[in-house]
Amino acid sequence: MTTDAIKGFPKDFRWGAATASYQIEGAKDEDGKGPSVWDMVCRQPGFVWEGHTGDVACDHYHRLEEDIQLMKACGLRAYRFSLSWPRIIPDGNGTVNEAGLAFYDRLIDALLEADIEPWITLFHWDYPYALFCQGGWLNPRSPEWFEDYTRVVVKRYSDRVRHWFTLNEPQCFIGFGHDVGSHAPGLRLGLSEVLLAGHHTLLAHGRAAQILRAEARTPAQIGWAPVGCITFPATDRPEDVEAARKEMFDIKASSDPHNNVFNNTWWGDPVVFGRYPEDGLRIFGSAMPRVTEADMQLIAQPLDFYGGNIYCGSTVRAGADGEAEHVETTPGHPLTLYGWKCKPETLRWGVRFLYERYNLPIVVTENGISCMDWVMEDGAVHDPQRIDYLSRHLKALRQAITEGADVRGYFHWSLMDNFEWSEGYKQRFGLVHVDFGTLQRTPKDSASWYAEVCRTNGANL
């Protein structure tokens, strides 16, 4: 493909960055906030690297105005953030905390004043501890609890907010949180219980989408943000492309059946098509919970866009039988600090394959790199690897658009270094460096670079 044939990003493309409430807010029990399951597991010895907690995190709760100035310096046109369910409803259900609602009022109003569009995620993993004690996502009432919470939020903020995500990465908070046990609430359940909790989260998504569609005070644009489990072809040969596409949407039998919940279609197909995929049903068999047609109709609410948190992927080629063969990277392949392999092709092919399967506009809801960043002797944070990573990935995203994918936005993960779940403060994904001793913010070189990308709508790439 020649340079002349490459289209630019759409005129109204949303350039943004993302965060999550527990990862940045701090103020763990201030102004009436209730505890979450992450507050719970951070008290368990050895659960989080070096015993770190989100008690203070980036202290965004007290530094909101400063952080919005940083967003402006990064050139953001949109900001994706999550609401803390237990900050708004301390027990998860029942009495609403006015101080919690008021915090997000201040955030939304300040964003709009700065000409930054707010995109709200209803749930990014900080499940209320009080509801966990009642069974959490295993409780059949959990979708109703989420609906009630959504109704409170929509009534309060939908006069100013139009863009909404229901759930962030169910593969993680169910797979890691209820199966592997490495994330909150730290459970290692049987497959039947894992699938039941997953089914309840999809019902919660459906109920939330219904409320947003019916009760929002301005027309809601609704999506969700699952993990993008990406497989891409080693070459552009049609047989390699088809093998990669099939591999990306297959659920395969495994000696450890729990591994199978970390995929695209077990979550995406019910949300878009109103059915669980046949290969998953066959593999999970008797472990499946009871599912009714009414359940599936509720889950499959109309969406306006399909999100994808995309960081890495695997390379395949077509074997002699046409089936995918995984292609190993050469020794010394570039790695992030997290240990993920840097493969820009994940954005080109990931969004293409997701768009082709689900026929919905795509929003890249997370993409970024953890680097070994620190403030250097000159007082700056030089992060050339992040700039190179973003340049390569955004060019690959542009290529997907050129090839026909309808992509509406890109949210860099993350605005600032933050509490990276079980990794604590080890991983630094931010455009802004945070000193977690002093909480001083220092924009990295990548922040000014990304601001120019936003200003030019990607024309400088």
Image: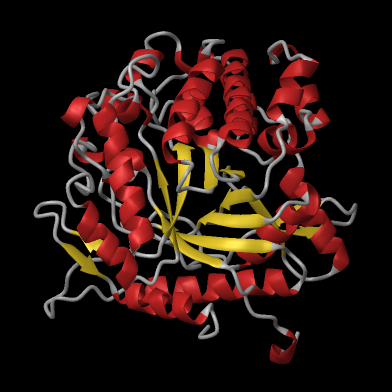
- Looking at the picture, tell me which residue is in the foreground, 247 or 350: 350
Q: Residue at x 28, y 71 (%)?
A: 444
Residue 432 visible, this angle = no
Tell me the quarter of the picture where residue 99 sits.
Answer: top left
Quadrant of image for the N terminus:
bottom right
Q: Residue at x 74, y 11 (%)?
A: 286
In the image: residue 446, left or right of residue 350: left
- Looking at the picture, tell me which residue is in the foreground, 264 or 210: 210
| Residue situated furthest left in the rendering | 438
Give the percent coordinates (x, y) of residue 207: 61, 25
Tell me the quarter of the picture where residue 182 sits.
Answer: top left
Q: Residue at x 79, y 55 (%)?
A: 356
Give the percent coordinates (x, y) of residue 147: 53, 23
In the image: residue 38, left or right of residue 461: left
Q: Residue at x 78, y 51 (%)?
A: 359
- Looking at the picture, tell me which residue is in the foreground, 259 or 297: 297
| Residue situated furthest right in the rendering | 321
Tell me the quarter of the picture where residue 328 sits.
Answer: bottom right
Give the percent coordinates (x, y) of residue 267: 66, 34
